[in-house]
Amino acid sequence: MNAMWQSDFDTEVYVFQRAKHLQRHCGDQFFIKEDASGFLCAIVDGLGSGKEAEEAAKAVVEIIDANSSSKSLADIIARSNEAVAGLRGAAIAIWRADWIKQKLIYCGIGNIRFYLVGTDDQLVYPISSTGFLSGRRQKIRTQEFAYKPGSTFLMHSDGLTLAGIKKYLYASGAVENTGHCIESNVADVPEDDVTFLVGRMK
Ligand SMILES: [Mn+2]
């Protein structure tokens, strides 16, 4: 799948996903939801690949969806952690942008990358905690950043290896074009599930 995500609030996001070996089941799942006050976005990478990885990742996305109005990302993560008990584990990165405060709160556990161009045009890349959601109790750390409207972000699962991140984040053209450029780095038949979201903050 590769398409512009349809926004009702002028957020621009290009979404790309390709499953390992083009399998029917994809262990990566993503979540996007926006409203007049902000934007909630996540990628979840179920451990391994195939049906069981997909099942774990989907269980987490269901929890995110059901709790998307919760103000606390830590709370959403804690519930997501409970949801994968008995399933494969999952890596997660989730963030919420507040359009009015122009601030973004990020929380990540495991190997999903997130990049954002910050207020001074410097690259912001919060480091996720190590590990993964497994059902076991763990410390949940959130980080907060300011951003400028119109700045570019990129979030991707570990199936994507990208050299020269900056040329994509500082590209001035349409989000869709940047998406196509990033996409050209993905193998026709990838060895891991690949998901990325590239967009511009409202
Ligand atoms: Mn992966």
Image (cartoon, grey):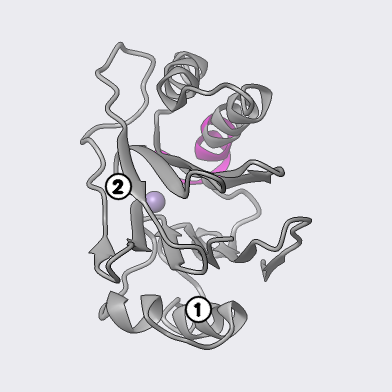
Q: Residue furthest front?
A: 100
> 10 Å neighbourhood of mark 2: few (<14), some, or many (≥20)?
many
Residue 94 visible in this rendered orientation of the protein: yes
Residue tagged 2 = 111
Which quarter of the rendered picture does the N terminus lie within?
bottom right
Q: Residue at x 51, y 82 (%)?
A: 178
Q: Residue at x 32, y 69 (%)?
A: 161
Which quarter of the rendered picture does the C terminus lie within?
bottom right
Side (left or right) of 170 relative to 189:
left
> Which secondary structure lies at badge 1?
helix
**The magenta stretch spans which residues?**
46-56
Residue tagged 1 = 183
Q: Residue at x 66, y 30 (%)?
A: 65
Residue 48 visible in this rendered orientation of the protein: no
* Image quadrant where residue 138 sits: top left
Report if the beta carbon of the residue with label 2 is closer than 8 angstroms to ligand 1. yes
> Which secondary structure lies at badge 2?
loop
Task: State the residue in front, 73 or 145.
Answer: 145
Dot 1 or dot 2: first in sequence order is 2
Side (left or right) of 130 relative to 117:
left
* Image quadrant where residue 171 sits: bottom left
Identity, as a three-letter code, of the amino acid under mark 1 = Glu
Instruction: Check whether the beta carbons of the residues at disc 1 and disc 2 lie within 8 A of each other.
Output: no
